[in-house]
Image (cartoon, rainbow, N blue to C red):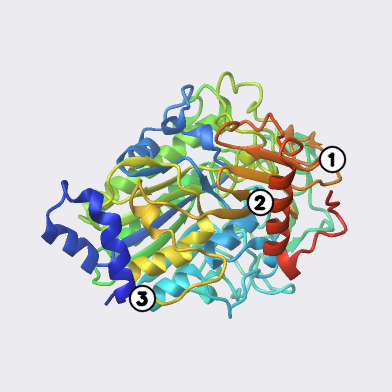
Amino acid sequence: MRSIYNLMIIPMALLSWGCQKNTSTVSESLNKKPNIIFVYMDDLGYGDISANGATEIKTPNMDALANGGINFSNGYASSATCTPSRYAAFTGEYPWRKNAQILPGSAPMLISTKQMTLPKMLKSSGYSTAIIGKWHLGLGTHDKDWNEHISPGPNEVGFDYSYIMAATQDRVPTVYIEDGDVVGLDKNDPIQIDYHKNFEGEPTAIDHPEMVKMKWHHGHNNSIVNGIPRIGYMKGGKSALWSDVDMADHFLLKVKSYIKDQSNKEAPFFLTYTMQQPHVPRTPHPRFVGKSGMGPRGDVILEADWCIGELLKTLKEEGIEENTLIVFSSDNGPVLNDGYYDQAVELIGNHDPKGGLRGGKYSLYDAGAHVPFITYWKGTIAPGKSDALVCQMDLLNSLAALTGSEISTPDSENVLGALLSADQKGRTSLILEATTRTSYRKGDLVLIPPYKGKKKNKQVNIELGNDTEIQLYNLKEDPSQMKNIAKDNPQLTKQLLAEFQKLRGLDYNETKKLELM
């Protein structure tokens, strides 16, 4: 049963739907907890979908979500990189509190088994929970044995079922892990992983360039798997190695099977579908190769769009489309050259993955964490566009309100009204992060404190947001962040800076890197 508090909130979000749904149907929507699917893309930019203005690439199934639900123009990940954003989305906690950074594939579990998490909260509300796809939040301990059961992992922080890759497609180990066990492993060919030293006799991209099918640009020159050089060293586990070009189909098959199995049960389900596209290495299935005209990056976006179409088709076939809330987003903004020569830069043409924003992955400028963000619930959410400020970190408290849970975390905010209705407000402020540095967004304004360091990551050709002067931008008037208005508004800048410092509080760990003016 929902709490009185939640019964007061949800009908307010439903007022605008009165002309589309009769009272009895609305009551049915409220009384039956919906299935929830969190579709989480990897490195997809705000401008990478045609619903957000892309003209050089067509994403009809992502557009179906955007045009049939609420498409947010101010939707954010918590960070401009993947591990921190995923940490925040699953825990409802700012990643800088944990000093969460991009993890190697060998890293131990980042989330404590004692922490409250999104899947734990939903399990307490009667949900079955699953994650299928990318994880990248660490597994086990520092000294884990990949050839034995690996714990802790997703199953120990709230997921009943997990079928994942440990980190990213460009990092070892290049194997699937189901409920803590490597899939298809031959114990007579044990897996060995090291991120510092190669194993004797094992070829690398540097020593054996003739074995490489995808040329590395920077950082990706260690062990070679399926002709692709990776980050980190791996030996053994040949029977368990994944096929890169089949990865999208492989995860999709698991997603379909899970949905079909759960649709026959009375309990609602929460599924996190963490897709690997368009992260490097971009390895589209042959049926998508060349379809975008923009090389592998464009091709895998089309592949991902097709997967989403298959997801929607499965929900319809199982008769649960109208009882399923879908949240669609990306873990951070876009990047073109992120370690391989794959023509992403050369074939970009007129396409702007940033959607007119500044920066990108790794950057404190807006394109770093400003991402596609869509909520879709056929027959319940009225289609519309929203400028409400929402963050993936808010899913925990918001979905708790939706499902009648009393659980909450301090950093997550209940923006359920905004997630369900385009005319509702979101949060008022948000601290954003990019590789240990943070900025402060309040309303339409964003303040970036002065940071020493490189202004540009030359390897990926992205501005990082560093400057010796404090920066203040009005994103509504200047979404491309071309006009720094800090000097023109000294009192406002001072006020926002004071608020920012207070919110960062005792957890503010950047004093050696940050010189406040």
Asked whether the residues under the numbered discs 2 and 3 touch, taking CB atoms below 8 Å apart as contact, a structural biologist would say no
According to the image, label 3 marks what residue?
Answer: 125
The residues bearing labels 1 and 3 have C-alpha atoms spaced at a distance of: 47 Å
Q: Which mark is residue 440?
A: 2
| Residue ID at (40%, 75%) | 123
Which residue is rendered at x = 60% and y = 76% of the image?
Answer: 151
Nearest to N terminus: mark 1 or mark 2: 2
Between discs 2 and 3, the one toward the N terminus: 3
Q: Residues within 10 Å of mark 2 (few under 14, many from 20)?
A: many
**Image quarter of residue 340:** top right
SS for callout 1: loop
Q: Considering only vertical position in the picture, is 448 above or below 13?
A: above
Q: Position of residue 81 (x, y in %)?
A: 65, 50
CA gap between label 2 and label 3 equals 33 Å
Dot label at residue 454: 1
Q: Nearer the viewer, residue 364 or 237?
A: 364
Whether 60 is drawn above or below 165: the answer is above
**Residue closer to the observer: 82 or 414:** 414
Dot 1 amino acid type: Lys
Residue 399 rendering spot, x and y as whole percentages: 40, 65
Cα distance between the residues tagged 1 and 2: 20 Å
The N terminus is located in which quarter? bottom left
- The amino acid type of the residue labelled 2 equals Tyr
Q: In screen coordinates, is 516 left or right of 271?
A: right
Residue furthest toward the top?
349
Local crowd size for mark 1, using a 10 Å CA cut-off: few (<14), some (14–19), many (≥20) = few
Q: Is residue 261 visible?
A: no
Q: x, y percentage for residue 386? A: 41, 43
Disc with the residue nearer the chain's start (1 vs 3): 3
